[in-house]
Image (cartoon, rainbow, N blue to C red):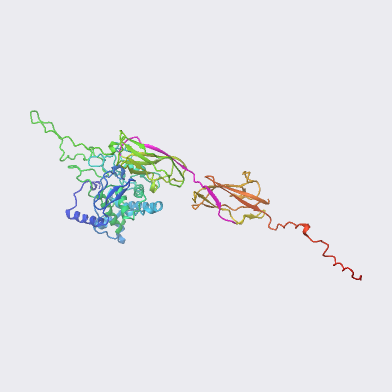
Amino acid sequence: MAAQFGRRLRKGAATTAVAAAAVAALSASQAPGVTVDDQGRQNTGDATSAPDATVDGDDSATGNSPYYTDLPPLSSPNPSPSAGSETGTGARGTTEAGIPATVLDAYKKAEAALREKKPGCNLPWQLLAAIGKVESGQARGGRVTADGTTVSPILGPQLDGNGFALIKDTDNGAYDGNATYDQAVGPMQFIPSTWEWAGRDGNGDGRKDPNNVYDAALAAGHYLCRFDWDLSEPKDLRKAILSYNNSTDYLNTVLSWLEFYRKGTHEIPDGSGSLPVDRSDDGVRPGITPSAPGTTPPARPGTRPGKPSGSRPTPTSPAPGGPSAPPTTPPATTPPTPTDTVGRLEDAGTASLTAMAGHTFAERISTRAETDAGKAVAKVRIRFTIVGDTDTAFAGGESVATVVTDASGVAVAPALLAGERTGAFAVQAAVVGRSVKGVAYKATVTERAADALVRTGEKALTCVPGGEFAEPVEVRATYRGEAAGKVAVAATLVTSADDLTENDKGPFFKDADGKAVRTLTGLRTDADGRLTLPKLYADDTAGTFLLRLTTAGGATLTVELTVAPADTPSPDPDPSSDPDPDSSADPDPAPTGSPTP
């Protein structure tokens, strides 16, 4: 079966023409073109635009490795009830529409995970299937073990610059077994330097294995969604695909399979999928047949053992006395790229990097690329990598961002969004494709804070001795006028306004065991900055008591609590104002001069 993955005869001219017409029809309304903006992201232009030549191979998922160019049939049959038993025979449309069971499951699980983690991306599993078809023929027709690991490694040709991108070894052969040059690895064909930060554990075994279809599919999904792209929008969809492999032909091929799978597909047994035929590097090296993904890398880059070198004969020494060999033409020299001229990286005026948990860093990292003579170098890709024990991330939740330097040689990283984990971490800036000393930027995430705390209710908080307060204590925290969510709050029943020690009598809270406590910690406001304290109770002590609340950031609030009997009598009136207590019993005095009875 492996022989089927090698070089095959090309399809007939008629088939190729029909398939090309299908791509033309599909891409007529999605004509691609890309440039790179000042954030290092690819943007589509008009139909005549070409992929950006400044995009280095090691800044894409695959290193712009070769891919399979087979196109789908012009129509995709909707699966019939019996299609699940399809084994790769019969009409080509039916065969091509089938996806091996484990591979299909991996794509759907990845879509579900991204729907939860990044719902705004709208990643369809059919896109992963289209890329998987183009990159590895659905993991060589589903030749995977029960846990989704390929039966044997799938390797692209070594990226030695001879007809391919030049990417020298970045992993000491850990992923691809090649300590000289990198090779794309696994069913989704990640190069080692990309897998190092993009890899994911999709099957929950605690490992990130590029040869596992669950891990690779989830990693591909996160990679395609890393810039907050909405893949339901054609423009963002094109940008995401081109970021995977920067080729217009690649884009059109993936789009054609995406459309095909959207029309209908079905599950087939693992190992029974159809295998691809043509590759994008067919004929790229005259007289040489490149190795296919999954084959052992040849002894000489680009050749197969035992295959003649075709139009590149090996020079032989002339016979004694015979004519001397014609002089050879020295190879043409390649002018240096901007990346080749970079001598160092410098900080371009980045200020202190500090932000509160959950907030965006106000300052953005700026790095300048220079020659050894101090001259600015434009059109150089700078990779910013977040390192350290932190959940801070760039846009889209990623820990890596790549940005192209502008005319002044400066690359400005995307804004950093602080996570919930406080403490220090670093961001490392490095040149993509060149080994020069990078720049490390220190950053700090501080605890969420509030600068104001107010009570939301106005009712007096009263209770009878030995009872419970009917009205709860509700407060709202703000920071610079905005709701301060997830802010830590401590509540203590203090002795007095001048003595903030814990009171030993009066109102109290109850712990989980029902015991009285007068200090609570670990309280947090909700997303709107609001907090309702647990129920308050009172002992037998009457009087006025104080509840003091404090937050990180210094906001404080003192709440008054009153404990008093419900039937407390009013105090006696002033005796001096009362009438003579005996006057009401005495008769009115007789009028003067009246006769005595």
Residue nearest the observer in this picture, 176 or 561: 561
- Left or right of 565? Residue 131 is left
**Residue 234: which quarter of the image?**
bottom left
| Residue 88 pos. (x, y %) | 26, 54
- Left or right of 102? Residue 331 is left
| Residue 582 pos. (x, y %) | 83, 62
> Is 342 situated above or below 563?
above
| Residue 48 pos. (x, y %) | 23, 51
Does residue 457 belong to the magenta stretch? yes
> Is 303 situated above or below 28?
above
**Residue 173: which quarter of the image?**
top left
Res. 374 in view: yes
User: What is the quadrant of the C terminus in the image?
Assistant: bottom right
- Residues shaded magenta: 433-458
Residue nearest the observer in this picture, 494 or 282: 494
> Is 140 situated above or below 317?
below
| Residue 473 pos. (x, y %) | 58, 53
